[in-house]
Amino acid sequence: MSTTSNARRRKIVSRIFEVLCAAAVLVALLPLALILFYVIKEGFGALNLAFFTQMPKPVGEVGGGMANAIAGTLMLIGLAALFAVPIGCVCGIHLSEYPGTRFSSVVRFAADVLNGVPSIVIGIFAYGIAVLPVKRFSAIAGGVALGLLMIPVVVRTTEELLRLVPSGLREGALALGASRSRAVFTVIVPAALPGILTGILVALARVAGETAPLLFTSFNNRFWSTSLTQPIASLTVQVFTYAISPYDDWHRQAWAGAFLLVVIILALSIIARLAVRRLERMNRP
Amino acid sequence: MSRHGDRGFRFATGAVAGLVLLIVLGIGFELTRQSSLSIRKFGFSFWTTKTWDPVAGDFGALPFIWGTLYSSALALLIATPIALGIAVFISELSPRMLRQPLTYLTELLAAIPSIVYGLWGIFVLVPVVRKLEVVLGLKPALGVGMGAAALILAVMVIPFTSSVAREILKNVPSAQREAAYALGATRWEAIKVAIGFGKSGIMGAVMLGFGRALGETMAVTMVIGNSTIISLSPAKPQYTMAAVLANEFTEAADELYLHALIEIGLFLFIITVVINALSRLLIWKVKAA
């Protein structure tokens, strides 16, 4: 009698915890839904042609847009990729070709640690090496900051995706007398290329939304600029400036900017997701 | 020739890989160098005093350290049970069909930029918190403050902790659960066995979330109220290390002020490196087992 009631009690406890776990999922998805809802509701309505084509209006004037900030963000993430992709990919290749060495584990560890360094700290470092020496905020400094944030992401995804390449391919190339570098560049990397490009997209999506490291590297610019050595506007810093301002029209534009950011980031991550799925299907034996 | 080429390839790619290591060391070196004035002038008292007076050139970072640790701890308190619940649900309980979409949705939380969290925080969350504070009779009922910051941080930390915890649970050998079932365990008891097996990895997942919370900047800056108050009250506006950097860095007119701010950056760097290193070691240990 007491054993059956004990068993029933344990079953009930189990059931309660199972329900709590399911509730946890709902609790986490609620803010996600709320954020997306408000970004769409406030942001989509605030989008108009002027937002994409016009420059910011002077303080107090209604209207204008973020044309310079959109161009600035594209330029900054382009600069970041230019500098982070070669370093990240070569580093990832080294890690996947020589996975067991002590050096590789140290580098892998360093990449993981770098990935966890707050982006604002990376911003200070970029300020120290790219702003202080020339005493001027610049697009280059912003690109350096974002590039530093991108490197660990590119390193780890490149390594992981190169490892997905069936080892028979590598062994085949080596057995035919190819050198290690030839095997890597003509066989292994091409096989993993779609995946690596995907990894780069994910990294781009991550840095496109960064604000903190840009505050004191690329700073901000109310005017159109494509100069590498001048301060440059970015969507994120512009959203921040507008969000903490007291003007309703600027708040409206901040929501529009946030909407655009979320759309860019979701698009990049969905493309990446589809590409990974295709890759997995291709590599399935 | 081919052997020679192989060695060249190994060293060339190794040199580039070494850059990653150099960057981490370079950050530590550069931040120490750029904060030397403040380190020399204030020494250890920088961390234990609470005057922050740029005009008088007197700097103590205690309010920022307090705010960072307190907001992160509160966030962790909220986020950890939820993140672990999600990890358990996705890896152990959910129908196979729902696994992928749920994983993707929870990870979306990590993809949303901090600035968007902050914007949403200012215009949606803060007014709700303010109403709540009025109802509860908490003063000064501004809405902005420690509570709003901890709530937003919690949401931002959940995806990091839950995705690592899920990986850890996935790595627990199914023999562990089967053994529990064979002994007559209920579903939850079997899950407890799996969690126990991956205990140190799950600790690692929680610490990873802690590291994220410590350095989170924009969203916190926008809702915490930016006031150098040290208080336990979640209704009081306070400040964090990352937030003071975001707010004051470009205004630092003299060198000592700048060095004091960079010293805060250095401290943030050191604690996040230590916490991340520990959490990675814990996670790797479980995965290797």
Image (cartoon, coloured by chain):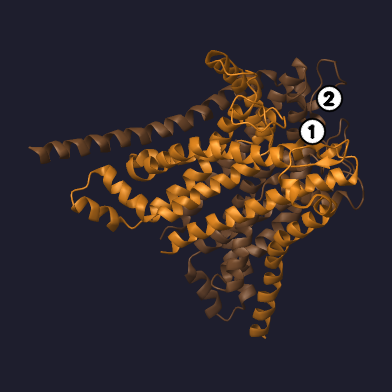
Chain colours: A brown, B orange
The answer to which image quadrant residue B100 occupies is top left
Residue A145: % across, % down:
76, 49
State the residue in front, A270 or A186: A270
Task: Give the amino acid at mark 1.
Answer: Ala
Task: Give the amino acid at mark 2.
Answer: Pro
Placement of the C terminus of chain B among the 4 image quadrants: bottom left
Say which mark, if any, is on residue A56: 2
Mark 2 neighbour density, 10 Å: few (under 14) some (14–19) many (20 or more): many
State the residue in front, A176 or B63: B63
The residue located at (70%, 39%) in the rendering is B64
Say which element carries label 2.
Answer: loop
Say which element carries label 1.
Answer: helix
Placement of the N terminus of chain B among the 4 image quadrants: bottom right
The answer to which image quadrant residue A66 occupies is top right
Residue B183: % across, % down:
18, 52
Asked if labels 1 and 2 touch by Cβ distance under 8 angstroms, the answer is yes
